[in-house]
Image (tube, rainbow, N blue to C red):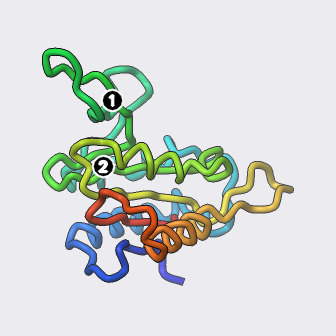
Amino acid sequence: MDYPAWKYYPLNAKAPEWVEEVVNVVNRCELEISTVDAHTGLSSDAVLEHLRSGLETLGFEVETGKGAGQKVRRTVLYGENGRPAVNYDIDAFHDYLGVAVEVEAGRGAANNADYRDIVRTSLILDARFLILMQPFAYRPNPKAKPIHAYDNSRDQLDAIYASRRLVLPFEGILLIGY
């Protein structure tokens, strides 16, 4: 199995050049973040911390913590006097390319956070692309049956793009299984 697994949507478009660079960042962090063997207790913040330097090298602004000045905030709506009225916090963003990044793990894998990520990120004004990172497998505890978040998100995106009933505003979505 290649690590990480990834799939670019729409399936009838060649992945942009930056996709290989992002996939390489994830590949270099395999020993720290891989969920192939269903690690437990790995948070999305911990995964993002391992990916941070590689993503920053590629030009991404990456969340550094949960404090107001540490989040990556992007505008959804402008209000009075042209001031941002609705903003969403995301894990990382590349201003020049318009690439938004959401990393899920743990509770996100268990609670269908991919749905939320797709909808909320589609509302961000400058988001041309979405990178959604999901664990291959997540176990809330060692005895629990693993949740296959990457497979679930892949099946969901396959259905969205095949049905054409829900048209997303992105030029493309990169799904990465770590």
Residue beneath disc 1: 87
Q: Nearer the viewer, mark 1 or mark 2?
A: 1
Give the image location of residue 73, x and y in percent. Answer: 31, 32
Circles 1, 2 touching at the beta carbon (< 8 Å): no
On screen, residue 14 above or below 43: below
- Name the N-terminal-most of marks 1 and 2: 2
Residue at 52%, 45% (x, y): give it.
Answer: 44
Residue at 53%, 59% (x, y): give it.
Answer: 134
The front one of 18 and 53 is: 18
Residue at 34%, 56% (x, y): give it.
Answer: 130
| Amino acid type indicated by mark 1 | Asn
Describe the element under mark 1 as helix, strand or loop: strand
Give the image location of residue 34, x and y in percent. Answer: 55, 63
Residue at 56%, 48% (x, y): give it.
Answer: 113
For this orientation, the residue located farthest to the right is 143
Tag shown at residue 53: 2
Residue 142 appears in which quarter of the rendering?
bottom right
Number of numbered tags placed on the structure image:
2
The front one of 51 and 174 is: 174
